[in-house]
């Protein structure tokens, strides 16, 4: 069984920022995950949980108060598009 998450809004926002030249696809951005969602009816890769991404930040944004991961914008977009399709 696979898991999916609706990243449609975040995908649209990131594509818009790339199209407007605000973010280069090769640029490393900071991404934030939301709350972990537990699954009691199936296991994904041995784990019964998924922690979706909920936001991204420009490299100039101050993210010192929150936990973030770094990833290239194009890789983040590809990940979200893939997870948006998996059911």
Image (cartoon, grey):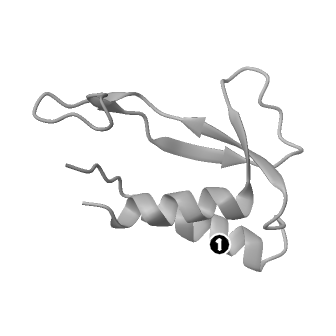
Of the pair 4 and 63, the residue shown nearer to us: 4
Residue at the far left in the pictured view: 41
Q: Residues within 10 Å of mark 1 (few under 14, many from 20)?
A: some
Query: Relative to residue 3, is residue 84 drawn left or right?
Result: right
Query: Relative to residue 62, is residue 6 drawn left or right?
Result: left
Query: Relative to residue 77, is residue 27 drawn left or right?
Result: right
> How far across and how far down the image is residue 69, in percent?
68, 35
> How far across and how far down the image is residue 53, in percent?
51, 43
The quadrant in which the C terminus is found is: bottom left
> How far across and how far down the image is residue 18, in percent?
75, 72
Could you tell me if residue 78 is visible in this image?
yes
Snapshot quadrant of residue 19: bottom right
Query: Relative to residue 43, is residue 66 drawn left or right?
Result: right
Residue at the far front in the pictured view: 46
Q: How many labels does the image show?
A: 1
Of the pair 1 and 11, the residue shown nearer to us: 1
Residue at the far top in the pictured view: 65
> How far across and how far down the image is residue 32, in percent?
60, 37
Relative to 21, say whether 47 is above or below: above
Point 26% across, 51% down: residue: 2
Point 59% across, 45% down: residue: 55
Relative to 82, say whether 21 is above or below: below
Relative to 28, say whether 24 is above or below: below
Residue occupied by mark 1? 15
Point 72% across, 59% down: residue: 73
Residue at the far bottom in the pictured view: 19
Point 77% across, 48% down: residue: 29
Could you tell me if residue 7 is visible in this image?
no
């Amino acid at each position: 069984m696979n898991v999916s998450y609706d990243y449609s809004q975040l995908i649209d926002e990131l594509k818009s920022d790339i199209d407007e030249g605000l973010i280069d696809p090769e640029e490393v951005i900071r991404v934030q995950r939301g709350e972990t969602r537990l699954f009691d009816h199936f296991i994904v890769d041995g784990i019964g949980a998924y922690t979706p991404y909920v936001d991204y930040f420009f490299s100039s944004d101050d993210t010192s108060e929150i936990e973030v991961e770094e990833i290239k914008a194009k890789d983040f977009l590809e990940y979200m598009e893939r997870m948006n399709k998996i059911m």
